[in-house]
Amino acid sequence: MTREQLEERFQLAGEPVYRGRQLYHALYRERQFDLGKITGLPRRVRAQIAEQFEVTLPAVERTFQSADATSRYLLALADGREIETVVMPEVVGGVVGKKIHRTTVCVSTQAGCAVDCKFCLTGALGFSRNLSAGEIVGQVLRVMGRGNSAAAPRVNLVFMGMGEPFLNYDQVLAAVRLLADPEGVGISSARMTVSTAGVVPGIERLGEETIRPRLAVSLNAPNDELRTQIMPINKKWPIAELLRACRNFPLRPGEKLTFEYVLLAGVNDSLAHARQLAKLVRPINCKVNLIGWNPGPDLDFHTPAEALVLEFQRELKQRGVPAYLRKPRGRDIFAACGQLKLAGQESCL
C-alpha cells in the first residue's frame, strides 16, 4: 500500500491522517514488519492494525552463496509459488571481506517468463503469473533486512530477474514508485534499471513516466533473422520497430540507453555481427554491455573464448560505440544473467 492509501484507511477509521504516515515510515523506512511492535504508534492503534492488516514478505526457502560473495535467494510467495532474487555486494578494491560500498539487487517481476529466449534458463520454466507491486517490493525489503546488503551505503536495483517487466508494467511501475519514495525505502529511480527483451509499448510508456528507472534493452542479434531464432519476441516487435522506440526514448541529462548483448559462441559473436550491430545502434545515445553467455543445463549454446569477446568489443569501439564487458556474478550458483530457474543445484561449475 502507498502512503496515500494508508492515510486514507486511517482517516476512514476516524484516526488522524498522520497515523498512516507513521505506519508507512515504520514499514518501508525502518523495515519493522511486526505490527504489534511499532512503538511509534499508540498501543491501541497497534492492536487495531494488527487485527486489520498483515505483512506478507516472501519467505526465504533456500540461500545459495557464490565464491564471489553473490547470494541467490529462493523465495516462496504467499500462494506457494517460488521466485528468485539475487544480491551482489561490491567491495572496496574488489576483495571479498572488505567494506561493502555498493550492493546490487536483481529483482524478479514475474513467476516464470513467457518470452522464451532460447539461451535463457528462466524461459524453460514457462509463465506462471505476474507479481504484485507488494511482491516485487517485498523482495527488496526481505534482502535489505538481511546482513549482506543492509550495511551498504548504496543500493542499486535491476529489474532483470525472472520475467519480462513490461508484460507486468503497471505493477512494476507501482513498485518503482514505492521504492523511490524518499519518505519510504528511498532508493533513487536513477539507481534503478529495468531490462526488457523488446516490448515496444512498454518502452514507449516508460518514456512518459515522471518517476522512472533507467532502460536496458536485450538486443542480442544485429538482424531480424538471427534475433527471431534466439528471441521469438522479435516476430512481434522486429528490430526496426524496437530501435525506433529506442531512438524516441527521452533520456535525462547524462543518461544513456543500454543495449545488452549476450554473446553466443558461433551464433552472434563474429566481427561481421559486431559491424552490423555498430551500424544499428550508433545513431542512438547508448552504450552496449557485452555478456558472455552464462551456461546452463539442457541449453545448446557455448560461451565464446575471452579473446573473441575482446575482439568483438574492440570492433564496436573502433566504430564509435561505447562497449563494456559485464563481468558475470554468481555464475557458479546459477545466479548470473539468464540462469535463474528455481534450480536446486549448488553449482554449475
Image (cartoon, rainbow, N blue to C red):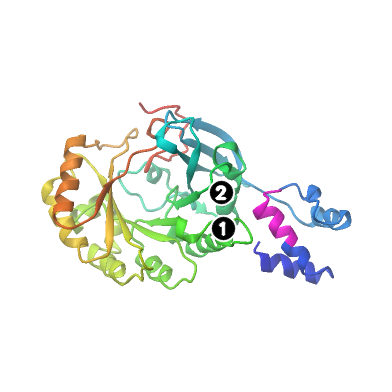
Main secondary structure type of the part rendered in magenta: helix
Query: What's the residue at 43%, 73% (across, down)?
Result: 208
Percent x, y of residue 345: 44, 28
Where, quadrant-wise, is the N terminus in this rendering? bottom right
Mark 2 closeness class: few <14, some 14–19, many ≥20 residues within 10 Å: many
Percent x, y of residue 108: 48, 49
Q: For mark 1, what is the residue?
A: 179
Above or below: residue 212 compared with residue 69: below
Q: For mark 2, what is the residue?
A: 140
Residue 247 relative to residue 57: left or right: left
Numbered range of the magenta stretch: 22-32
Mark 1 closeness class: few <14, some 14–19, many ≥20 residues within 10 Å: many
Residue 19 in the magenta stretch? The answer is no
Which is more toward the observer, 205 or 190? 190
Query: What's the residue at 65%, 54% (across, down)?
Result: 28
Q: Residue furthest right?
A: 44
Above or below: residue 35 compared with residue 98: below
Q: Report the amino acid beneath label 2.
A: Val
State yes or no: discs 2 and 1 in contact (Cβ < 8 Å): yes
